[in-house]
Image (cartoon, rainbow, N blue to C red):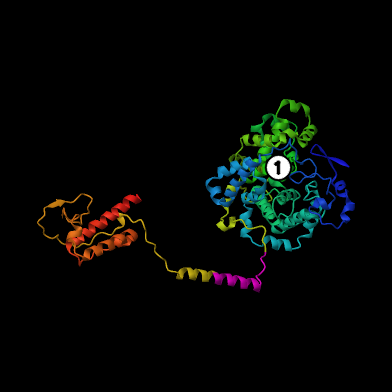
Amino acid sequence: MARIENGHQSLDTMSIRTIGSSRMDDENSLGSDSEINGFTSDRQTDKYGFIGGAQQHTEESAQDLHPQVLRQREVKWLDMLSHWDKWMIKRFNKVRLRCQKGIPPALRGRAWLYLSGGKVKKEQNQGKFQELDSQPGDPKWVDVIEKDLHRQFPFHEMFVSRGGHGQQDLFRVLKAYTLYRPEEGYCQAQAPIAAVLLMHMPAEDAFWGLVQICEKYLPGYYSPGLEAIQLDGEILFALLRRVSPLAFRHLEKHKIDPILYMTEWFMCAFSRTLPWASVLRVWDMFLCDGVKIILRVGLVLLKCMLGSREKLKACQGQYETMELLRAIEPRYMQEGFLVREILEVPVTARDVERENHTQLKRWKKSRGELNFKSPPRMHGARIIMLSEPLRRQDLQQNPTIVLEVPPPTPQLKKKEKEKKSSMKKRSSIKKSQPIVEIPNPYSLLSDVPPPPSDPPAPPPVSNETPETVPETVPETVPETVPETVPETVPETVPESVPQTVPETVPETETDPSHQQQAPPTDLPCAKESLLKRSTQSLSSTEQDTYL
């Protein structure tokens, strides 16, 4: 069997589920829900998980990035998510720009949860989802939810199986929301919103993301009477007059109310209308900037389909116009084209609020007060974050996979104690060993300690004429030394001197530490000066040879 969905021919979901039903009796463990239904070898799943249908990925509907560019964007997003509060307060324009370029697929689920404020909501309500999940729920809403489960993305491998993991989590999320907001209950348009979130995050995160979308981004959309969606339809129609006057006059001429063509667009956030690559890009910008992105997408589609006279010639009546809007040309929904057009539409959050105020006055004049008063709408992630106080720990990323470490056995404990004791012994042995100082065999003049402060003894008086000492002699040596002193060493020095001089000379050659010792005071002054001059000459020759 075949049927037409959005102008595309697709197989019936029941026929897909019956394919390979004989394989379901096999007891082999299969991975995904699509494998349970028989899609084991012949199925062709795209990178988003679609097996078929109008939203399956094609090269014409999406544009792929170079892997290197994708890795660079992932690094940037990881840095932003690690310091989320600083980026949102100080550099939100940069966050918006990166959302417009597209969030990396590996981080899209985490980024959506942070943008929507679901991360903070989840941390501030620990255990709330588990409490709601454990309750049976209202039978009235449970029956309606169960009937809608198989209708949500039947060509996606996560929801293709009746009773599979995807449908079970979808039921849990929707049932928990009916218990969380019993005054609203359940609306059929909430199911595709929750399904899109479940494709990117666990059930608990998807629940809090759904709460934020229903309460902050699209308040009143899913309440009884659908008054908020009708009011936004009038806002869309009023903005269309400024963006595309031709399309506005055509719809006004044939009296086509916005509620006839924009209900599914807005309530499902275009998740059942656009190709999947375009859906993800629209959601990236929508969760960052709010409902104005949804309005811009609607304005772009209306302008492309009804904004030229050639297009209007093909639809002369109400029926032809509605058929045209139900089957939008794929080129207008292509990812690159659609994102460029969305960014060029001159509609801001201030324009939306101004028009909302005008349409609300008209509504009260013609229909009276609203029956359901919804909370105020938040235009974007930054306003949502500033409206709710948060703590720094609310933004910390918790590990998704926790491994339980088994307790250590007694044998392991003994080994650890032995290792610790051996390490302590080694450290104590190292500390007990004394530090041996090795003298420097190449000591310089700068290493010699200064002479004693006491002035040297005066030289002996002799009849010989003194002569000035060369400049190389240190200041401690007397200024005048007899000329005959170096020549008459063997004559004038007593017998005991030759024994001391040869002993001191080899010691200064082998052990430089003796150079630092002061000469003995028992010798006469002349002998002391001779010894100083001899040691000084030896040290100077050693220095010359070393340098």
Q: Is 460 drawn above or below residue 55 in the view shown?
A: below
Q: Residue at x 72, y 61 (%)?
A: 133
245 and 269: which one is in front?
269
Q: Residue at x 70, y 62 (%)?
A: 130
Instruction: Give residue 280's position: percent from left, percent from top.
Output: 69, 43
Instruction: Give residue 148's position: percent from left, percent from top.
Output: 80, 51
Q: Residue at x 20, y 49 (%)?
A: 470
- Dot 1: element: helix
Q: How many marks?
A: 1
376 and 368: which one is in front?
376
Q: Residue furthest right?
A: 22
Q: Residue furthest left?
A: 463
> Does residue 399 appear in the picture of this structure?
yes
Q: Is residue 409 rendered magenta in the image? A: yes
Looking at the picture, which amino acid does disc 1 mark? Val
Q: Which residues are magenta?
A: 404-422
Instruction: Give residue 222's position: percent from left, percent from top.
Output: 71, 50
Horizontal side of 438 relative to 303 (left or right) equals: left
To which residue does mark 1 refer? 279
Q: Main secondary structure of the magenta part?
A: helix
